[in-house]
Amino acid sequence: MLPLWDLGLWQQLLVPALLISVVGFVESVSVGQTLAAKRRQRIEPDQELVALGSSNLSAAFTGGFPVTGGFARSVVNSDAGAQTPAAGVFTAAGITLALLFLTPALYYLSLATLAATIVVAVLSLVDFSILRKTWRYAKSDFFAVVATLVATLTVGVEAEPLAGVGLSLVLYLSRTSRPHTAEVGLVAGTEYFRNVLRHVVLVSPGCSACG
């Protein structure tokens, strides 16, 4: 089934689609890095982006849902001991069986019960110590984290990438626009140059150097 090639519809969906793609990519990479860190593994964000793009293109031509990596599903799979992508096949089979045979029993469960199930599943990913660690490591990263958190809780998940990425970009440009410069001098008896404000060095009145 080919997508509907309507220019007006594309223009209406351009901004929402952009936000959804950014949120989906950030969510997928975030949960991937979190779970990989627990196993002392690493992921490649570039390959994740390629995989997400290919999957969503395939979904667009087959009538499927948008594809992304979810926190709740990934954590449940990880806690259940999943090791390979085959876990997704077994999950799909389990969901199919539940829809066919357990729908009457699950129909009367309240949304609060289902929400509690998701909250319990993702609690292992909540780490408030990151605020303290980020404050000690880099103040600019700390403010980016806080801005992202506040925007998500007050405005919504669609504002999260704009706040986090936007503030990070502004702080980066501000930092790189004012690079560190220092006057250096020769350390006596060596071939090394050091900052004149931190070391006892030899300087020549006729020249100066910055590094």
Image: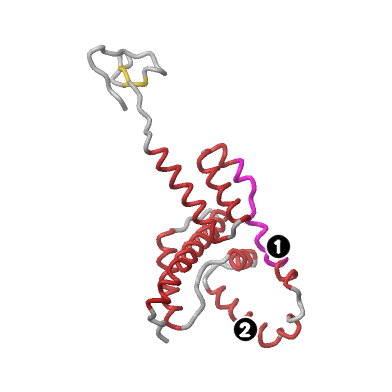
Image coordinates of residue 55 in percent, x first then y, are: 44, 73
Q: CA distance from mark 2 to mark 1?
A: 23 Å
Which colouring convention does the figure follow? secondary structure
Q: Callout 1, which amino acid?
A: Val
Residue under the point 45% across and 83% down: 62
In the picture, measured across the screen, residue 209 lies left or right of residue 89, that is left
Q: Residues within 10 Å of mark 1 (few under 14, many from 20)?
A: few
Residue 62 in the image: above or below residue 194: below
Question: Quick one: SS at disc 2?
Answer: helix
Image coordinates of residue 57 in percent, x first then y, are: 41, 75
Q: Which mark is residue 96?
A: 2
Please state, as top left, top right, bottom left or bottom right, where the C terminus lies in the image: top left
Residue under the point 38% across and 34% down: 178
Q: Callout 2, which amino acid?
A: Thr
Q: Residues within 10 Å of mark 2 (few under 14, many from 20)?
A: few
In the picture, measured across the screen, residue 54 lies left or right of residue 122, that is left
Image coordinates of residue 168 in percent, x first then y, are: 47, 47
Residue 94 in the image: above or below residue 19: below
Tell which of 13 and 126 is nearer to you. Answer: 13
In the picture, measured across the screen, residue 158 lies left or right of residue 184, that is right
| Residue furthest front as drawn | 8
Q: What span is in magenta?
A: 116-132
| Residue furthest left as drawn | 206
Q: Which residue is mark 1?
A: 120
**Does the stretch in magenta take in 41?**
no
Residue 133: image quadrant is top right
Q: Which mark is residue 74?
A: none
Residue 173 in the image: above or below residue 195: below
In the picture, measured across the screen, residue 152 lies left or right of residue 169, that is right
Residue under the point 71% across and 84% down: 103
Please state, as top left, top right, bottom left or bottom right, where the N terminus lies in the image: bottom left
